[in-house]
Image: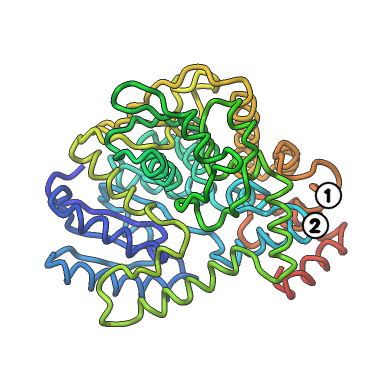
Amino acid sequence: MARGALKIAVIGGGSSYTPELIEGYIKRRDALPIKEIWLVDVEEGREKVEIVGAMAARMVRAAGLDWKVSTTLNRREALAGADFVSTQFRVGLLDARIKDERIPLSHGVLGQETKGAGGLFKAFRTIPVILDIVKDMKELCPDAWLVNFTNPAGMVTEAAIFHGGWRRTIGLCNVPLGLIKTASDKLNTPVDALTVRFAGLNHFNWHRVWDTTGNERTAELIDLLYKPGVAVDDENRPKNIANIEFPYEIVRDSGMLPCYYHRYYYAESDMLDDAIKKFEGGKTRAEEVKRTEERLFALYKDPALDHKPEELSQRGGAYYSDAACELIASIYNDKKTEMVVSVANNGAMPDLPPNCVVEVSARITAHGADCYAVGALPTGVRGMVQHMKAMEQIIIDAAITGDYDKALHGFALNTLIPAGSKGKKILDQMLVAHKDYLPQFKDAVERIEREQPDTVAYVEGLLGGKG
């Protein structure tokens, strides 16, 4: 790693989150001697990366900095000599997410872009790309750190580490930041006066909370957040997750605080009913996000705009980018900042194998994440996390090999997807809908198209001929 002249490459630089990333680097100007920031995208994202790149350059100039901001469609150009590489890309853009949500919902099944059928297809599209990025990094920037917040972040990070062999990979998520803030707000205690320990997987973690006197406050928070008649809406809840009530008794029995995404498991039928109601009303979350992005990019085009607009907070992923900047600053300066990260398990969670990725609390040092040991999990939590990890690992294998049998097995293991004929039908339809981004599944897609013309017709009808 360079000392004093950092080159940072951002894969997916045309993302609407990029202004927050630039703001985060500007805030840390004294901690990170940046020389170059490269924003990388693909041909489909050319216009967006040019708009965001121009705005990023204005933000840097307004801050009085001489950093060079470059945009490119040539990933190798950006990676050459990079010290840090962050990934925030979406294969197929938001149109792919719309398919991820609409096809399952048309069958009365949750799409959900990280954990449901949509999340599994996002993994299918994304994992081959992250492995290609790692391959380029081995050649062009062999000492760089890879900071991933491309979803599904846990699976993508695991693919990079254990299938790509890139041990200098750390995955990030904004969800723990919101949960920590909620604990602070509800207990009326500053964040730095609390100890919060996370354990689990990305978008599937639990946590416990202590104060500075050593008293555990977890049970108190469970009552404040989930007890009927007491609980109020959590203002830090991500905008893509409906405010459905948790079953208080199950949370209390677990003895740990769940993350927002556990609503999809602890209150599955209620969450599904809410999603179907919105779908039947002509709305999916992906389409809402697409409209938000259109408004954001209209703002970004303004040549007078040289700061992150407030409207970006409506996008639903606030703090991702700032967390990435803090992670990079902590590695570079050996700050030992406490963060929640997705990293190789290596015994931090003994209920899971060492050669998988978990999301846990850690200190971030110059050599990466020093994870806090979790110990044995409560029975119910342990069963859920072991089941989920088995599903994730089969999906990762399917994404790499294009093995249809593994893909169907992964679908069957996912508790948000009905096993049997309905799950298989959804899998087949989504393979056809996303075929342009799934070359590894070419043989399976050709078989489906040859043997199931009704599947092709259904997809074209649902998506307006855009299969």
Q: Name which residue type carries label 1.
A: Lys
118 or 184: nearer the viewer: 184
19 or 267: nearer the viewer: 267
Neighbour tally class for label 1: few under 14, some 14-19, many 20 plus, Cα within 10 Å: some
Is residue 170 in view? no
Q: Quadrant of the C terminus?
A: bottom right
Relative image position of residue 224 (x, y in whole percent): 50, 38
Judging by the rendered image, the residue that carries numbered circle 2 is 107
Residue at image location 50% in from the left, 25% down from the top: 355
Extreme residue in the bottom direction: 303
Q: Is residue 238 above or below residue 205?
A: below
Q: Is residue 201 above or below residue 23?
A: above
Q: Quadrant of the N terminus?
A: top left
Q: Is residue 440 left or right of residue 21?
A: right
Which structural element holds mark 2? loop
Residue at image location 34% in from the left, 30% down from the top: 195
Per the model, the C-alpha gap separating discs 2 and 1 is 8 Å
Residue at image location 67% in from the left, 59% down from the top: 101
Relative image position of residue 46 (x, y in whole percent): 43, 73
Q: Is residue 465 above or below residue 226?
A: below
Q: Quadrant of residue 287?
A: bottom right
- Specify the label residue 199 is tagged with: none
Q: Name which residue type carries label 2.
A: His
Which structural element holds mark 1? helix
Q: Quadrant of residue 383?
A: top right
Residue at image location 46% in from the left, 70% down from the top: 45
Relative image position of residue 360 (x, y in whole percent): 43, 31
- Specify the label residue 422 is tagged with: 1
Q: Is residue 213 left or right of residue 388?
A: left
303 or 231: nearer the viewer: 231
Q: Are the residues flagged by discs 2 and 1 in contact, CB closer than 8 Å? A: yes
Q: Nearer the viewer, mark 2 or mark 1?
A: 2
